[in-house]
Amino acid sequence: MTAPPRSQAAAVGALALLSLPVLSLAACAPTVRVEVAPITIYAKLDADVRLRLDEDVKALIQSNPNLF
């Protein structure tokens, strides 16, 4: 196997040297951080809704005893 011609080796070397700054800039990608405050929801439930939810929860626990 023969070595590549000198001009081809020089072109590959120059390409490698020119790609280093591009790769180093790609490594410095900016990071975006977003802070979101938690949302608090106040719900006013009447007795009928509470009773239905209570019955649904009891049925769910009875059908899945290993849930909790």
Image: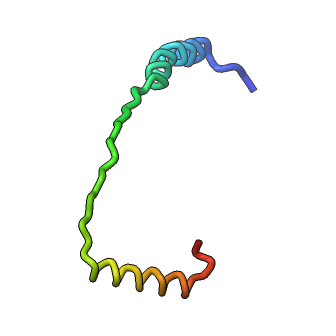
Q: Nearer the viewer, residue 1 or 26?
A: 26
In the image, 51: left or right of 5?
Answer: left
Against 23, residue 60 (above or below) is below
Residue at x-position 75% and y-position 27%: 1
Residue at x-position 56% and y-position 12%: 10
Q: Residue furthest right?
A: 1
Give the x, y percent position of residue 13: 57, 14
Q: Nearer the viewer, residue 62 or 33?
A: 62
In the image, 22: left or right of 66?
Answer: left
Q: Nearer the viewer, residue 44 or 41?
A: 44
Give the x, y percent position of residue 61: 53, 81
Q: Quadrant of residue 45?
A: bottom left
Residue at x-position 47% and y-position 15%: 21
Give the x, y percent position of residue 4: 64, 20
* Location of the C terminus (image quadrant): bottom right
Give the x, y percent position of residue 26: 45, 25
Q: Quadrant of residue 31?
A: top left
Against 35, residue 61 (above or below) is below
The coloring applied to the image is rainbow
**Total numbered circles:** 0
Residue at x-position 34% and y-position 82%: 51
Q: Nearer the viewer, residue 14 or 5?
A: 14
In the image, 46: left or right of 14?
Answer: left
In the image, 66: left or right of 37?
Answer: right
Against 37, residue 15 (above or below) is above
